[in-house]
Image (cartoon, coloured by chain):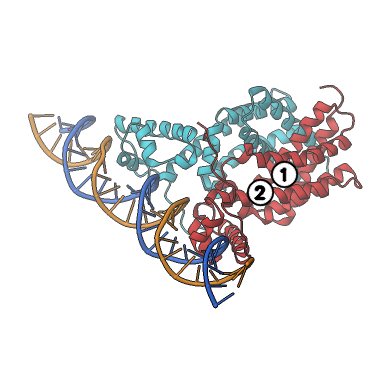
Chain colours: A red, B cyan, C blue, D orange
Amino acid sequence: MPRSKRPALAPRKQPVQARSSELVASLLEAAVRVLSREGAARFTTIRVAETAGVSVGSLYQYFPNKQAILFRLQQDEWEKTGAAIDTLLGDTSRAPAERLRATMRAFFQSECDEAPLRLALDAATPNYHDAPESKAHRRRSRSVVRAFVAAAAPRASPSQRRFAADLLFMTMTAIGKQVSERRPTEAEARRWADATAAMVTGYLAQLSPGD
Amino acid sequence: MPRSKRPALAPRKQPVQARSSELVASLLEAAVRVLSREGAARFTTIRVAETAGVSVGSLYQYFPNKQAILFRLQQDEWEKTGAAIDTLLGDTSRAPAERLRATMRAFFQSECDEAPLRLALDAATPNYHDAPESKAHRRRSRSVVRAFVAAAAPRASPSQRRFAADLLFMTMTAIGKQVSERRPTEAEARRWADATAAMVTGYLAQLSPGD
DNA sequence: TTAGAATACGAATAATCATTCGCGTTCGGT
DNA sequence: ACCGAACGCGAATGATTATTCGTATTCTAA
């Protein structure tokens, strides 16, 4: 049974004065620290407020509930990966295979750098897969990914390319997450990234006209 | 800071009489039901006991704590996927590409059939990646996967093959999980499985002597 | 300077949970 | 039939948590 109404995630009140903007900023910073250092289970409104050097009451002035803090953090992560895809995968001055490899490397590296945060965020957040913000995030990257697939597999049908674009995105995020759970060294992460890029490149190379 | 001692996961007491064996069985069945229907957040010892038609006290006779129930469920899942890999990927009477496709299809299908359970289990359990039981599970499948890679990429070096075996396992589990989160139809799941198999097959085909 | 808006506070509230323990019941062997 | 062990029970305990709200403090504009 899905919840009939999704709980409020929008800020309760907008910071007006400078001190409250700083308060919100330090709250978010503290939330990241608590999540990475203590994990999802110990992510508590009081702990976040204490870490920020602020009282719980102040926290609730600007966030309607605990979920809203997590959601905000998740949005920031989406923003980051979206930007990386735009600049690396969309860099048409380089050959497709090279672009894909660079994107995978950057994505896996960033995933591993922030592994504690991202893992805890995954554990703490419900499935935001259907949230409009999540869809918007995927939509944003879609055009870049599709343009990339068109360049890498020009002979494939549009339908094949649409699917391949989804597959590329899914493969990157899925394997990236799994790799980060292993806490690999930088060199290992690069090896996984290169192998993942090779798999996708191999798949794209197989595509030919016909559905 | 990692926990210095990992909490007890072994049963507190072994069922001796028939009635207590049935009690444990109905407790596990109830745990699956609660996890799939209510989700990880509402997975509660009292709810599990109630669903099993049993008191909390009885639950604690056979499980030292809540985690132990989840761990037991996780082990059952590991057992299932291990068996599937053995029979499908290890079936040397069929061509490698076909074997891989069959394995992916079965894995993705089962992942999607039990999606609520597996997702909730993921959300509820800590990272058992370093638990000896988890390592044993991977070790068990390793030989079959390596034999498969040897058959599919005979010209690759042993080192390449070891890595490729890890990559195959990781790709299957990572993408399988991500696909199941989308709650796809059976046909969609099959399409993702085939595409994933094609990616891996393409990667294996690229392997040649040299590191 | 000052009123009132904005901000900050944190003890109090209400709810939920994991786990325990003392007691009554049932079983299996003799 | 009988006894000790195994089993089953569930109210009570102790701890943690999200969220509220009445009050105190600080800012800003006039």
Q: Amino acid at mark 2?
A: Gln
Asked if one can make out residue B157 in the rendered structure from this viewpoint, the answer is no
Residues marked 1 and 2 touching at CB (< 8 Å): no
SS label for mark 2: helix
Q: Position of residue B192 (x, y in %)?
A: 70, 29
Foreground mark, 1 or 2? Answer: 2
Q: Chain of mark 2?
A: A
Camera-nearest residue between A186 and A67: A67
Left or right of A74 in this view: B160: right
Q: Position of residue C6 (x, y in %)?
A: 57, 61
- Give the distance between the C-alpha atoms of the residues marked 1 and 2, in whole angstroms: 34 Å
Q: Amino acid at mark 1?
A: Phe
Q: Chain of mark 1?
A: B
| Position of A36 relative to D29 (above/below) | above
> Which of the 4 quarters of the picture holds residue B163?
top right
SS label for mark 1: helix
Q: Residues within 10 Å of mark 2 (few under 14, many from 20)?
A: some
Residue that carries the numbered disc 2 in the rendered image: A75
> Which of the 4 quarters of the picture holds residue A162?
top right
Q: Residues within 10 Å of mark 1 (few under 14, many from 20)?
A: some
Residue that carries the numbered disc 1 in the rendered image: B163
Q: Position of residue B64 (x, y in %)?
A: 37, 46
Identify the disc placed on residue A154. Answer: none
Left or right of A71 in this view: A42: left
Camera-nearest residue between A73 and B134: A73
| Position of A75 relative to A163 (above/below) | below
Residue at position x 66%, y 49% in the image: A75
Camera-nearest residue between A200 and B133: A200
Camera-nearest residue between A133 and B79: A133
